[in-house]
Image (cartoon, rainbow, N blue to C red):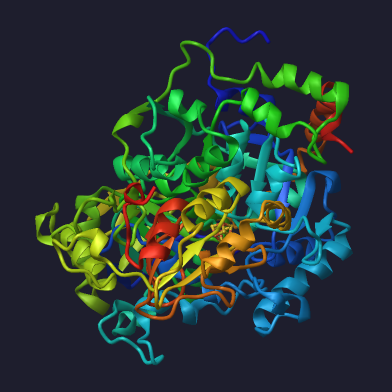
Amino acid sequence: MSATKPRTLYDKIFDAHLVETLPDGTALLYIDRHLVHEVTSPQAFEGLRMAKRPVRRLDGTMAVVDHNIATDASRYTGIEDPESRTQVETLEKNVKEFNVPYIPLTDARQGIVHVIGPEQGLSLPGMTIVCGDSHTSTHGAMGALAFGIGTSEVEHVLATQTLLQKRAKNMRVTVDGVLPVGCTAKDIVLAIIGKIGTAGGNGHVIEFAGSAIRALDMAGRFSVCNMSIEGGARAGMIAPDETTFEYARGRPFAPQGEAFDRAVEWWKTLPSDEGAVFDKEVFLDAAEIVPMVSWGTSPEDVLPITAAVPDPESGGDEARRAQLRRMVEYMGLTPGQKLTDLKVDVVFIGSCTNSRIEDMRAAAQIARGRHVAEGVRAMVVPGSGLVKQQAEREGLDAIFRDAGFEWREAGCSMCLGMNPDKLTPGQRCASTSNRNFEGRQGPGGRTHLCSPAMAAAAAVTGFLTDVREIV
Amino acid sequence: MDAFTTLTGIAAPLPMANVDTDKIIPARFLKTIARTGLGKSLFANLRYNEDGSENPDFVLNQQPYRRAEVLIAHENFGCGSSREHAPWALLDFGIRCVIAPDFADIFHNNSFKNGILPVRLPREVCDQLMEDAKLGANARITIDLERQVVVRPNGEEIPFEIDPLRRHLLLNGLDDIGQTMQQAPAIDSFEARQRAAQPWLYR
Ligand code: SF4
């Protein structure tokens, strides 16, 4: 490396994948890994077919179904909804026609694309990783540059294994200190978004750093990077370290043996150099973080669980006040009402934010020996078939079932209303997913984002609950 | 993709910030395998009541905005998902240009790829255009990409910035895969270098 200027993690991975710089400064960036799912790929394959173009790197591509599928036994007998079925069948037809490697529904490795990528070792440090889904930022926790793309870009990557990219700005969010009891990675990232806002990271790639981030296990790091996009950043990343390497070691698609050791040598050169310049810096003190919950319909509208519903008339300019009024109305709230007085109808534990084995364990710890409150429907949806198997080996499924939770098959499930798992209008849900937009979990549904432990706590009490009061 | 040169049309005012992709096109409408036909589901949760009837208060249900070709909104338009269904739905409805103080990155990108021009203008200017738009059918606004100006109904011209490569592609309706294909030799040699250094990336 001849570069003398200190560089960031992002700069290093970007530079290492630069195929060419076009005259106007746009970069042609090489893509190592392309993950494909059923929702954003049909029109891309159609484009290839029309232009008679093949997929350039079959060994750099992997397809899976996750968004449309049911998460109960009915998924094995065929998808009921004709449009969902068409989308899944279209993917199956396309992977066959183009020879793309594919993990089918019947395979134990099937799951949410952002869970199985790292789980299979498809997502590794130093890589450029894309997928037609904005939560591709998740894979950045491996120390990779990973971001979501639209269908036109899916087609572009399938055909050329590259993307036209403008270099993003560097932003660093440093979280130092020790996280208090009852707080998790999810609370960190909700606190970050509350602080920077949903546009805070626009135009930037965020590197999450600091002792509190270093201390997180991989599951926690995935949760943090997952929600980079809710903070406006297309990608979030965490420098690879021993935690990362240990996680990657032995995964099916990771290099093995001596090749792994050589890969680690390179991965160790990736962390941002001392003195690297960030265009924007944000600092948080981990010790000040408390269990968080969203109250409104934008991920930036989060509050500590101890807080009360804000008064719309107290905030900002008229446009903001109008937005707050709309949120309070949509969410069925009364200004001044304590968040812990909000009764939940549904609890959803799952999604690419929080469906890994560590998340299952955290929720099970609260569920153990307790029971889901009267009138509450609580579901636990593992992120992949392998997470499900692991949880069952540990007896977590029994804990959940005994406590009255539904134990489901892997998929996106109630994170978004496009499969059978949906909220009905007016239902209030404590959810471990990442988006609380109007109608996200089904038309008229009311989402409160929180950690798995907080969601499990809400399930057993029937109200949004400060998990610190029951642990 | 259709080229975008000059557009003169009716602008619909949507004075909302953080208009997210779930608002633009709710998830339940993403099950299409074509690019077309999504226009009727654009802003579905705002545009239709629960029983499927039209919500008369929503701007796109009012005349003349049913024929709007331009949308004017507030900050962070298009945040949320990377799904291209959002620009497809706008396009299918007939909207070719969105004007806002800023846009979410992926939406901004996806718009260009589908022949929709996202124009960034300061909040005060957007508010001014929003007032113009409220005047209805007589207040057509023009977006001239060649000259990089928005022309208000009173003739005042407001210049805007745009990335030169994107402007070029849009003006000519060019497909960027074709452009990139011309770089095939550079891609080949990148792969050869990478394969030598990190053989495990190749199977
Ligand atoms: S779990 Fe939710 S956010 Fe994640 S990929 Fe699936 S739908 Fe998207």
Residue at 27% in and 79% down: B137
Q: Inspect this view and state whether residue B152 appears.
A: no
Q: Inspect this view and state whether residue A332 appears.
A: yes
Residue A93 spot, x, y in % from top left: 83, 70
Quadrant in which the N terminus of chain A is drawn: top right
Please determine whether, in this image, residue A96 is positioned above or below residue A122: below
Q: Which corner quadrant of the figure contains ligand 1? A: bottom right
Residue A458 sits in quarter? bottom left
Could you say which is closer to the camera, residue B188 or residue B151? B188
Residue at 83% in and 45% down: A57
Could you say which is closer to the camera, residue A5 or residue A244? A244
Is B190 displayed left or right of A321 in the figure? Answer: right
Residue A166 sits in quarter? top right
Residue at 69% in and 22% down: A267
Residue B187 sits in quarter? top right
Please determine whether, in this image, residue A274 is positioned above or below residue B58: above
Outermost residue on the front side: it is A369
Residue B150 spot, x, y in % from top left: 32, 56
Is A385 displayed left or right of A354 in the figure? Answer: right
Is A239 displayed left or right of A317 in the figure? Answer: right
Residue A279 spot, x, y in % from top left: 39, 25
Residue A373 spot, x, y in % from top left: 40, 71
Outermost residue on the left side: it is A313
